Image: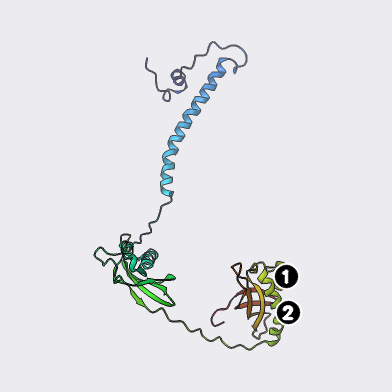
Amino acid sequence: MARRSAVDDGPTALEESWDVPKPQSRKKGWGGGGGRWWIWVGRILLWTFVLVVIVNGIRAPFERFTAKDGATTTVSSTPTGDQFPVSAASTFALQFTQIYLHYDQGSAQTRAEQLSRFLPADADDQFGWNGLGQLSAGSIEVSTVDVKDPNNALVNIVAQLGTRWVQLAVPVYTKDGSYVISGPPALLEVPPTAQVPNRPGIEHDTALETYLKDNLLTGFFTAYAKSDGVILKRYTGDNPSIQGLGSAVNFGSLGDVNAPKGASEERVVTATVQWIVPPTQPRGSESMVTQAYELTVVKKGDTWNVTSIRGVQAGS
């Protein structure tokens, strides 16, 4: 005999479909005792199972839908529209230059094979070199990138040739994520050295300059070199942002101190310091370097504290 649907016909049908035994004649006493108690347990378990199936059936497609909408997507590094891929093109041009500025007539074939990955199919395999002599470049770094359009740019690379510095303009063409050196590079002069503007003159607070030299900055820079937190607190007012150099150098001497006049109890002053630099090689000797600092000092009572330390910018 065919069984009826367990879901459509309710609990009775469920009992038949799962072959749950029919209860015998009820005995007097507690209704939860005997076989009847096991029937109710079976019904509870069965309906729990059915509800779990239904809930999971509804939840699964919903989770798939929301997971699809909220999934993390990987953004392609290939630019779109009018964006030239400056970073990738710079890397490509730098790799090319490291081969282009190194040659030796004894290994010309190796150079040609290495260059082939960067050049158009019809290019000269030595890309302009006559196969004689020797060249070896030192430091090679990307300087600037002059973008012409979404596909073309000149990558300007600064390189050291012996004692001289030159700039190499490397034309790069890109399309659909591929790159090629589109023409012969050009050696150019490096950008000229800029002229630092003269610092504006100040009216010196000589009394403050003397105080800073005699009572503050020598002790401060000595503790700053060693990262001596206990001593630094005396000169910084326990400023946690000033940690020191961790004995990378030792204090040598204090040079010029310049403090402007003013009524404010906060001043920005400059100071030069001569550091003693330990050698980095076991048999090396100590050296000395002079450096310049800009410090903010604040008066508290009869004393001054250093509240910040930084390098000196042009025009300061």
Quarter holding the C terminus? bottom right
Q: Residue at x 64, y 75 (%)?
A: 276
x then y, percent, for residue 25: 54, 10
Q: Residue at x 60, y 16 (%)?
A: 33
x then y, percent, for residue 152: 31, 68
Amino acid at the residue labelled 1:
Ile
- Secondary structure under tag 1 reads helix
Amino acid at the residue labelled 2:
Asn
Depicted 263 relative to depicted 19: above or below: below
x then y, percent, for residue 66: 43, 45
Residue 145 can be seen, yes or no: no
Q: Nearer the viewer, residue 33 or 57?
A: 57
Depicted 216 relative to depicted 65: above or below: below
33 left or right of 133 in image: right
Depicted 26 relative to depicted 259: above or below: above
211 left or right of 272 in image: right
Q: Nearer the viewer, residue 151 or 170?
A: 170
Quarter holding residue 65:
top left
x then y, percent, for residue 289: 60, 77
Quarter holding the N terminus? top left
Disc number for residue 215:
2
Can you name the residue that lies furthest to the right here?
302
Q: Residue at x 24, y 65 (%)?
A: 122
Disc number for residue 231:
1
Can you name the residue that lies furthest to the front here?
106
Mark 1 Cα within 10 Å, few/some/many (few <14, many 20+)?
Answer: some
Quarter holding residue 264:
bottom right
